[in-house]
Amino acid sequence: MSRGALYRFRLYVAGDAQNSAQAIANLEALCREHLPDRHTIEIVDVFRQPERALAESIFMTPTLVKLLPLPVRTIVGTLSQTQPVLHALGLGTLSV
Amino acid sequence: MKSFRTRVAKMSKAPTGITGFDEICGGGLPRGCTTLLVGGSGSGKTIFALQFAMHGAQYCKEPAIFVAFEETSKRVIANAESFGWKITALDPSKLFFLDAQPMPDLLHSGTFDLSGMLAALGAQIKKMGARRIVFDALDIVLALLPDEAARRREVYRLHDWLLERELTGLITCKASQEETNCVAQESFGFMQFMVDCAVILNHTVVQGVSQRNLRVQKYRGTSFDENQSPFVIGSRGIEVAVARTSARAHVSVTNERVSSGVERLDTMLGGGYYRGASVLITGFPGTAKTTLSGAFAAAACRRGERTMFVSCDSDGAEVVRNLASVDIGLDRYVKNGCLRMVSGRTIIGSAETFLVRIKTLATEHRARCIVIDPVSTLSSSGNELTAYGVAERLIDWSKAMGTTLVCTSLLDEVSSQAATSSPLQISKMADTWIHLNYLVQAGERNRGMSIIKSRGTAHSNQVRELILSDAGVTVTDTYTAGGEVLMGTLRWEKESAERGAKDMAEVAGRVKRVRLDAEEAELEVRLKALQVELEAKQVEKALLVTTTESREGVLLQGRSRMRELRGADTAIPRQK
């Protein structure tokens, strides 16, 4: 199954805000479908760790950062529009 | 500012350190509230915001955070250093820059909000105890939001967040020219209703001259100057021009007189100009306005007073040379540093810039006397609307500083019809107004000088002739003949005619005296002769009496002798 590289995601959320919860759900669904068993997700709550948001220049929530594979990509929002998100993550072709 | 804070406990103000702005709104921006700063591109929003943050951090013990959405903090700092603000030297725990420029390749998918940034800022605020925060170009982030509702929501979120922390917030927003005029514009219109204070910056170009204006559109809970105030971005940041009516209250009025540099003019003015007065010299080109103001400058330097001569028509060095030809030697004062010649042509830009430059230079030079020749330069094209205000503030400022100001003003051909209409209407504000004009008579052009007004001074009402020669500037009496003032050759002719007439009268007087002397002598002689004759007559008369008496005696004697001889009659006793 592991045809591709391992994906490392970091998702910055703002507590239990609705859009943040949505983003978590959307990301998990996306990974289940396209990247089963080859992804890790780190969730950072900016309310709990504000200094990380500051240090890592996160100004909007939710923000998804794809750390691996390179290049690093950043997507802002609830990740609800699947097609552009997949495209940005380099997964666009897989779904077709 | 501190005293202000304690006096008005309800409305606490956070001073911005921007010259003039704090006066407009009575101390600064509302402390613990949010202010919206709207303006077009290049209108000075970032500089304003930075000055506010800087001032708080440096002088008010209010650490500040500057959130840069548009320019990187590096560039903002570089700009600031050009104003001589030592930002890099400032402790980052006093003034913190947050780069929050959205990455150009940022992908949006679905809704998002600014909680992340606010959380991050929250941590930083706690860490440094920040009291002021600037969001520079918030419109950049708002533009990323998908719809109006989302924008509105985020702005409210930000506003609530600021209020909760009692931060003095300043949000800047871009707006095009039309939008700043029409405040109901959708994208930030609601922000203007939300915030406690809104300031609009305007940058327009009038006939090629850049004019900047600032207007406080609203300010809850305080009175403020509602008019547009011109401002300039000078070498030390923003300077807002305020018509300081209250500043005049501090003017210390003095009765001290300063010489105009022309002795007889001083006499005509009852001793000279008042110290701290504004003097206006109007006239057509070539009526010796510069010369008269030069004489004033020279007199000031002779007294050892530091003087600044702003010459807008010709170069400073030329003025010095030209004035030397009428024995006004400014050269040595320029050399010893007492006099500073400023060539006005080097001051480019609007009337406002001109004023700021003059103020700066005068302060640098510590000038007690200033000459501006001619001040009508202010109203050159593009500045017609602002020039009056600038001139007014120039006079206000010089009065507040106790500086004696001499301005010359050119009267152009159109207004020359009525000598009473001087451009800029400075004549209204000036304390002393001297008008120079040409009088053409008998094929000659002569310079006439009259004092149109001089407040608080008895002054001569006569038009006099101003004579320039290599011996200096003098004012002479003029003759009036048939209701006309005689000048130049006519005056000379009249003078010599009068001299001739006087000589004639003198000679005639002498002749008459001699004749009278002669007559007197003659009469005296006749008197003597008559006296002698009278004496002779008296002697003769006395003789006659004596003779008659003796004859009568003889006769009587003879008669009694005869009687005696006849012996028939008794002898008559002899008369004694």
Image: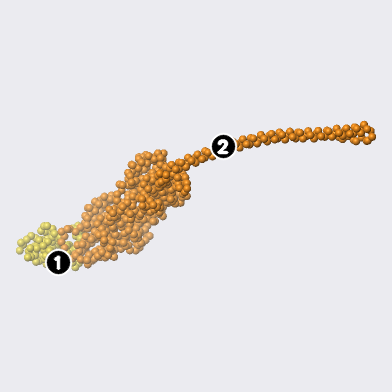
Chain colours: A yellow, B orange
From the viewer's perspective, tell me whether residue B303 is left or right of residue B350: right
Tell me which amino acid carries mark 2.
Arg
Q: Residue at x 68, y 36 (%)?
A: B527
Question: Where is residue B452 shown, x and y percent of the image?
Answer: 43, 50
- Mark 2: few/some/many CA within 10 Å (<14, 14-19, 20+): few
Give the residue at the far right of this rendering: B568
Position of residue A91 in the picture relative to residue A59 (left or right):
left
In this figure, which residue is indicated by the disc labeled 2?
Answer: B510
Decide which of A36, B219 is in the foreground and name it. B219
Q: Which mark is residue B467?
A: none
Chain holding disc 2 = B
Is residue A20 among the parts visible in the rendering? no
Residue A34 placement (x, y as % from top left): 8, 65
- A28 horizontally vs B63: left or right: left
Whether residue B376 is visible to the viewer of this picture, yes or no, is yes
C-alpha span from label 1 to label 2: 126 Å
> Nearest the camera: B24 or B500?
B500
